[in-house]
Image: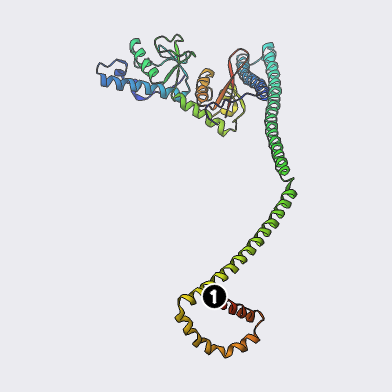
Amino acid sequence: MQLEYPPIYSFPPLYTRQPNKIIRTKQIESWITIILDLASKNKLWTISKDGTIENSLNIFQNNDIGRSVPPLFIVEIMKIMFTNGQLVSKSDKKSDFDSDLSNEFYILWKPIESWGSLILEWFETSNKMNQVVTLYELGEGDESIGWEFHEMPAPLLVKSLKNLVSRNRCTLIKDENDKYIAMKVI
Amino acid sequence: MGQKGSKIKITETDRAVLELKRSKDEIHKFTKRTDQLISSERSELKNLMKENPRNYKENTKVRFLLKRIHYQEHLLERASDQLINLENMVSTVEFKLIEAHFLKGIQNGNELLKKLNREFKNLDEILDDVQEQIAYQNEIDETLSHSLAGVNDYEEEIDRELDRLNKEVNPEQTIKLPSTEGLASLPEPVHKEDLKDGMPSQKVEKVPGTEAVLLS
């Protein structure tokens, strides 16, 4: 993966937990911006608890300058992202950061409500209202190419759609194995 | 839309469309996979040819690979045909659903029209009734106007009586009257004869009236 990083990514103090609280807040903000930007530009959806994005790249480890963020500080950053709603658990069960067992999170560079709205917009513009649409069609189909949610992992799509369900705009349909496979949006 | 409590229903047709779409998705997945397979096999083939630039035509693996690629391409073509078929099917079904909606709308409209027309059925009866009522109203009006005429007569009587009383109460006026009557008396007889018969009779009526007052 050839990824582009902002200049601050090569700034060594970024990798040391800053003792001053105000500076540390800024530092964590920078980290969050780096992660969310990187994820949205390259469509990276998952991050594990130790900061490995899409099972291949540890964002907190910079080999170019030979620096890495200490694990405890990684947890601190991830925890803040979790409470900000910028990370969401992979499992369906609602849980807090520490008790989450899935060990992997989805990166939400957009809040879940915005994803829901974007999907709703797709339904409206592509004339799919009041029709059954499969999850595959929504996420992988040719008709959603060019939309930001294209190639979004199916469970995350379901999470976004559940937001639409709570807004009474959507019904999810399960298959015979009790797995979500389709939806109908009005 | 969007109101609380309004659950979106999944109908039988929705389920059927879903099945169609699922098979469509399967084919879509298949074409994607085959596409990838073909491109990877092509690059493999090229590599093999690069490795054996002289005897690649005799290499069974090269031949096999190319055959495989052709076969996969053939499959891909068929799959995309099927995909188009299914897509057409889905859109046809969706259009049919809209047509069904249209039919339902027409039926509802027809039903409503029938109902409304049924209400017009006793139109004749109502019109007759209205006519009757109008006639009756006219009758009432006539009767009323009659009785009103009666009231008028009565008022004339009152006027006359008041005149009489006036003469009684204010005798000076009666004294003054002769002078005016005297002036008018000359043309009066001429008028009386020229005018309708009713006029003199009225005068005649008045004359006994005054007498009656005098008598009482």
- Residue A96 x %, y %: 41, 13
Q: Secondary structure at mark 1?
A: helix
Q: Position of residue A84 (x, y in %)?
A: 38, 21
Q: Amino acid at mark 1?
A: Val
Q: Nearer the viewer, residue B123 or B3?
A: B123
Residue A63 seen in the figure: no
Quadrant that contains the C terminus of chain B: bottom right
Q: Residue at x 67, y 11 (%)?
A: B61
Q: Is residue B7 above or below residue A100?
A: below
Q: Is residue A131 above or below residue B145?
A: above
Q: Chain of mark 1?
A: B
Between A125 and A150, the one lying in front of the other is A125
- Rendered image coloring scheme: rainbow
Q: In the rendered image, which quarter contains the N terminus of chain B? A: top right
Q: Is residue B61 visible?
A: yes
Q: Residue at x 49, y 29 (%)?
A: A117
- How many marks the image carries: the answer is 1
Where is mark 1, residue-wise? B213
Q: Residue furthest front?
A: B215
In the picture as drawn, the residue positioned furthest to the left comes out as: A20
Q: Nearer the viewer, residue B106 or B17?
A: B106
Neighbor class of circle 1 (other Cα within 10 Å; few <14, some 14-19, many 20+) is: few
User: Which picture quadrant has residue A19?
Assistant: top left
Q: Is residue A125 above or below residue A69?
A: below
Residue B31 vs residue A157: left or right?
right
> Whole-percent x and y of residue B202?
62, 78
